[in-house]
Image (cartoon, rainbow, N blue to C red):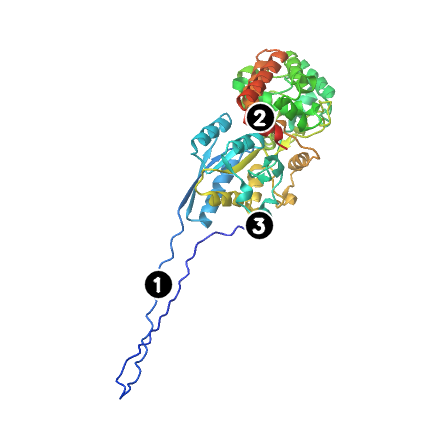
Amino acid sequence: MRKESRSIFATLSLVVAAALLVGCAPTAAPTEPPKPTEPAAAVPTEAPAAERVELTFWFWGESDAPGAEKWLEETIAEYEKLNPNVKINMVPQSTDTLISAFTTAAQAKSGPDIASQWATIPVLSQVWAGAVTPISDLLPAEEIQHWMNTNENMYDGKLWAAPLYLMGIPMAYNKELFTKAGLDAENPPKTWDEFITACEALKQVGTPCIGAGAAKASAFGAWMFAILGVQDLDSVDDIKAAVVGDADFNSEKYTRWIQEIRNMLDKGYFNDNIASIGMPEGMDLFPQGKVATAWGTDGQMVEWRRILGDDKFGVMKTPVFGKGKLADAYNATQSTSYFVTSWSPHKEQAADFIKFMHDKGRLEAWYKATGVVPADDRFDTALIDDPLLKTLAEYNLSPVNVWLENFIPTQMDMDGLRPGGSMLASGASAQEVVDLIVRTLELWRTQNPTELETFRNWK
């Protein structure tokens, strides 16, 4: 849809007054009526200047989709040309402080006009705290109907944040290292038993199977929960039941993935420095050829393929690990969501820029810059002519997509799963990690009775 620039024009109004002067004459000798006066010439007035608007955009997306920040800079420049009265300041956000920095800003009701949070609970937690203006109150339904995965940010009949792209978490594998270990590089593992067999074969030739980093409460534990933990569930209602206390998190359906990671660490299937490096550093071992596989985002797949080349690079879905109805679910989400803050004095202009991010031309530019599929049905998928990108798009459009991290309280994520992953990498038992998560949930329920009730009623 073409974006029309918004300008304010003043209309000049012509008020013409004609006064007829009626003279009084003696009754004996009537006089001629006076000639009407000429109307006064209209005095031109200047159109009022458009209101100067300055917006601050706290942006996160580069980690998901390398090239995103450059794309946004270009998008801002184009929007400012169309709307010369608007100035937009982009402030890139850190992964480690994305939630905490915005929470602090929301408490003070100051900071960005447009902000970023990961989809669903990170967004809805801020909604429940009164920090977000519904985007569906600011933009027409005929615009929003083109956006994809909007169900992730729906609450109380309203849409609170906008998607921009679809993001899956596939698994990359090194064909050369697979061949060296005697594995079929053209037919990667599809089941977990096959994957463990491959990991053992790789270990025997001195190659760590998986590259990861778990230092400093990185996202390692949260990713393993989302990628493997979901597969033992029958629906997302299962995790909601454990969160609110209606189900025991100690049961096997919630904890088997933790024990599996413990076993894999004990067998030496991860890089041996996993406990001392962060998640980005751990993932970067893959394009360096130091590990045989790694989980990563769609954007990282594109970058890793560029570095390794088609002859070495392969991509696959996570082998089926679970026993639940969601065992075949793929791990795709809209990932980052963008919304207008409740305290912004320029809500309409902020929403209009979010709409401009979905302009057809900007969606095509996004794809060219990042290789990541936009979350908008106006994007022409015929533009995807790269075999890797076609595969990733097919993954992202799988019949069932769940990123389980979207459906838990932020406190469980930040104080339970993330430090729990670091504990595992440092030698803690699976039960110690389970106990930490259980304590975190109990504390969250005690400290946040209103949010607990909201979460319980959230459909």
Q: Which mark is residue 1?
A: 3
Q: Which mark is nearer the camera, 2 or 3?
A: 2
Q: Eyeballing the image, is 411 above or below 310?
A: above
Instruction: Give amino acid for label 1.
Output: Pro
- Return the mark for residue 44: 1
* Left or right: residue 417 compared with residue 92: right
- The part of the image, by quadrant, that contains residue 399 is top right
Is residue 82 among what the camera can see? yes
Which one is nearer the viewer's eye here, 424 or 417? 417
* First-in-chain label (2 vs 3): 3
What x and y, as percent, mark residue 375?
60, 40
Q: Is residue 368 above or below residue 192?
A: below
Left or right: residue 319 versus residue 80 is right
Which residue lies most toward the bottom here?
A: 28
Residue 291 found in image quarter: top right
Mark number, residue 90: none
Instruction: Check the image and report above or below for 43 versus 248.
Output: below
* Mark 1 to mark 2 CA distance (whole Å): 62 Å
Answer with mark 1 or mark 2, whichever residue precedes in sequence: 1
**Dot 2 amino acid type:** Leu
3 displayed left or right of 320: left
As rendered, which of 207 and 18 lies closer to the eye?
A: 18
Q: Which of these two is toward me, 60 or 233?
A: 233
Q: CA distance from mark 1 to mark 3?
A: 37 Å
Residue 272 visible in image: no
Give whichever of 418, 359 is nearer the camera. 418
Rendered-image quadrant of the C terminus:
top right
Image quarter of residue 8: bottom left
Q: Earlier in the sequence, mark 1 or mark 3?
A: 3
Mark 2 = which residue?
Answer: 452
Which residue sits at x=50%, y=34%?
130
| Amino acid at the residue labelled 3 | Met
